[in-house]
Image: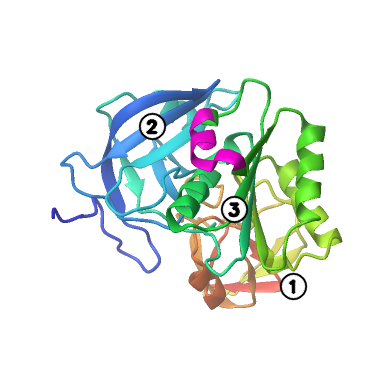
Amino acid sequence: MTAVLPARPATTPGEVPELLLEVAAVAHAADGVRALTLRHPDGAPLPGYAPGSHVVLTCGDRRNAYSLTGEGAPGEAYRISVLLRPDGRGGSAFVHGLAVGDRLAVSWPRSAFAPVATARHHVLVAGGIGITPMLSHARAAVRWGRSFELVYGHRPGAGAHREEVAAVCGERLTVHESTPGMLDAVAAVLADRPIGTHVYVCGPAPLIDFVERTAEELGWPAERVHAERFSADLDPGEPFTAHLSRSGVRVPVPPGVSLLAALEGAGVAVPSTCRQGVCGECRVAVVSGRPLHRDLYLSEAERSAGDAVMCCVSRSLDDHLGLDL
């Protein structure tokens, strides 16, 4: 078997090595949604991944995270589907401009939304382009014989991978093309599923908020509710102070202002690229206090360690956070 080698190996703890991949195929997945198949230029097998994983693409001068839609088996091509942003800019525009044969740097897959193997049943809830990680979940569930169902809501005629999802899920799929119908269906499902069920939701922020709020009202344990958000569309957060251990400087971080922005405003330069919590560029070591992690980069083990924070989106659980700056 051909060895899988990173195009750029990791050089710092927690850094994700990159692969140089080639666009092998481009397809139309829905109105405004482009599906790409990425392979190793030499045909080498790609690393496997947990269902619901994402990769970070270097899109020109920025890096964006996109969910993988495959089941995660080692060796298979990586497939992503990207919705073009209304303003026609950013990473989505870069991806929509790619053609077969183009090459780009792609991180190894990162898992931040994996299914719980011990769950008795899996309820998958997808809104719009949020279907991408759910397609990965569904494929893997079929492969491993897991009990699951998928509730998919989208605008009329805008269902990405609609036929593909139907082929994978069969009768376990229900589709809704109106918001009220979708929310009613989700509420009914959450009110009538066996103990041990886990729910996974990806889509617009209002849908995620509805699922989390409804599950809480119905008495679902928080550890059985899992959400994957598109980006760092986050609440303003509580104020705190960043203590810079090297200089002794204290930087106040008010609500609605990111730690990164506060540091920059105080004249402290921190490398950054995506500013959405996905690329890992603005990682800073934590020496005291408890980070409030809101990124899509750190693994669960790294989050539990509490010794690093992505300062573009994350905050502090305490009134102070000591940083190695």
Q: Where is residue 42, by image quadrant?
A: top left
Label 1 element class: loop
2 vs 3, front mark: 3
Q: In the visual, does 225 lie left or right of 214?
A: left
Nearer to me, 99 or 177: 177
Relative vertical location of residue 140 with respect to residue 184 in this rendering, above or below: below
Point out which mark residue 148 bears: 3
User: Residue 298: where, in percent of width, then height?
Assistant: 50, 63
Nearer to me, 121 or 311: 121
Task: Looking at this view, name the residue that lies furthest to the right.
Answer: 217
Point out which mark residue 36 bears: 2
User: Residue 130: where, in percent of width, then height?
Assistant: 59, 40
- Residue 166 in the magenta stretch? The answer is yes
Gap in angstroms between the C-alphas marked 2 and 1: 44 Å
Q: What amino acid type is highlighted by mark number 3?
A: Phe
Gap in angstroms between the C-alphas marked 3 and 1: 42 Å
Q: What amino acid type is highlighted by mark number 2?
A: Leu
Q: What amino acid type is highlighted by mark number 1?
A: Asp
Q: Is residue 210 visible?
A: no
Is disc 3 in contact with disc 1, using a CB cutoff of under 8 Å? no
* Residue at left offset 44%, top offset 58%: 144
* Residue at left offset 65%, top offset 61%: 198
Q: Residues within 10 Å of mark 3 (few under 14, many from 20)?
A: many
Label 3 element class: strand
| For marks 2 and 1 on the same chain, the one whose residue lies earlier in the sequence | 2
Magenta residue span: 163-171
Q: Which residue is mark 1?
A: 319
| For marks 3 and 1 on the same chain, the one whose residue lies earlier in the sequence | 3
* Residue at left offset 82%, top offset 54%: 214
